[in-house]
Image: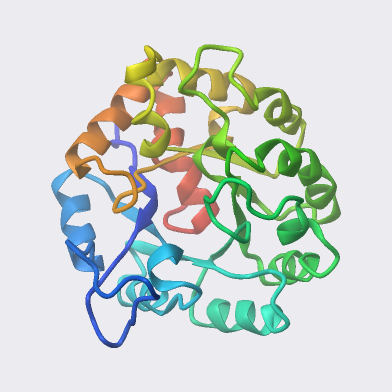
Amino acid sequence: MKPPMLIDAHAHLTVNDPAYPVSPPFREVRDPMTAERLLAALDEHGLAAAVAVQRAHVFGYDNSYVVDSAARHPDRLAAMCVVDAQAPDAEATVRRWAGRGAVAMRLTAPGGNQHGGPGGADWFASPSSRRIWRLAADLGLSMCLHLYRWNRDECLRALPGVVRAFPGTPVVLDHVASVEADRPEPYPGASELLPLTDLADVYIKVTTLNYARMPAAGVNPADVVTWLVSRFGAARVLWGSDVTQTPVSYPDMIRIAHESVSTLTPQDAALVLGGTAARLYGLAPA
């Protein structure tokens, strides 16, 4: 039997190169995770491919490095770009990155992870933001949303209306949509997440950011993944490392990922660790 294809669906690339300037207040990138370094890590740990996710806190909206890296290694990397859906030139920006090979667009709230930032869901759900969704549908791109705990519930309640408006456009929720799976059930935020199980275009990504918080709380990562798969199905759950963002070594990220699917069937484990991402991002035949 052919071994399952493993894919890191959330790998943040970084580089020290004047061709890819960092955004203030950064002056340089320490210990960069270049595309070549990531590919070496994939090879070392038996992974076939990865999704290169723009590190917006470092490079802002200039997605050049992830798209250039994916262009150099199209069989191993797919590019996910971060864009501002409310910018006046948002549609032209999406067209530009898609034209350079990006397969997904990622949106996040203004103010980032600063608690008390602007409320509401306009950053992805307003009429102006929906221009991006319409364009993504036309171009065959997937969408990705990064929610925080401070805006999670409000945004999850707003999401169904957007998803239903653009049927067939995959929507990936990063980091289990910031549902607090590091706490005992019922997980805070789950009551807003679970109604989305009826929307076939919604996918859930679980990352080391989620896993790293669980041991201290006495929560087993495998229990959380089993819970997600039992609700959404393995074909709508995918794993990513969050490398360079979450301070865990890459070997440990891979180890925890394998442990997190230990209670699943081999078929479901293969989907979570690679099959779902392969289908979403065109990294291998579904």
Q: Position of residue 68 (x, y in %)?
A: 36, 79
Q: Relative to 187, does residue 27 appear above or below in the rendering? A: below
On the question of residue 261 being in view, the answer is no
Residue located 71% across and 35% down the image: 153
Colour mapping? rainbow
Q: How many marks?
A: 0
Q: Position of residue 130 (x, y in %)?
A: 79, 65
Q: Quadrant of residue 33?
A: bottom left
Front one among 58 and 264:
58
Residue 128 horizontal side relative to residue 78, left or right: right
Q: Quadrant of residue 262?
A: top left
Quadrant where the N terminus sits is top left
On the question of residue 90 being in view, the answer is yes
Q: Quadrant of residue 178?
A: top right
Residue 260 horizontal side relative to residue 250, left or right: right
Q: Relative to 213, does residue 245 appear above or below in the rendering? A: below
Front one among 24 and 87:
24
Q: Position of residue 25 (x, y in %)?
A: 37, 71
Residue located 57% across and 30% down the image: 179
Front one among 202 and 282:
202
Farthest residue toward the front?
116
Q: Position of residue 267 (x, y in %)?
A: 43, 26
Residue located 21% across and 35% down the image: 252
Q: Relative to 70, does residue 158 appear above or below in the rendering? A: above
Q: Relative to 181, does residue 29 appear above or below in the rendering? A: below
Farthest residue toward the bottom?
19
Residue 60 horizontal side relative to residue 132, left or right: left
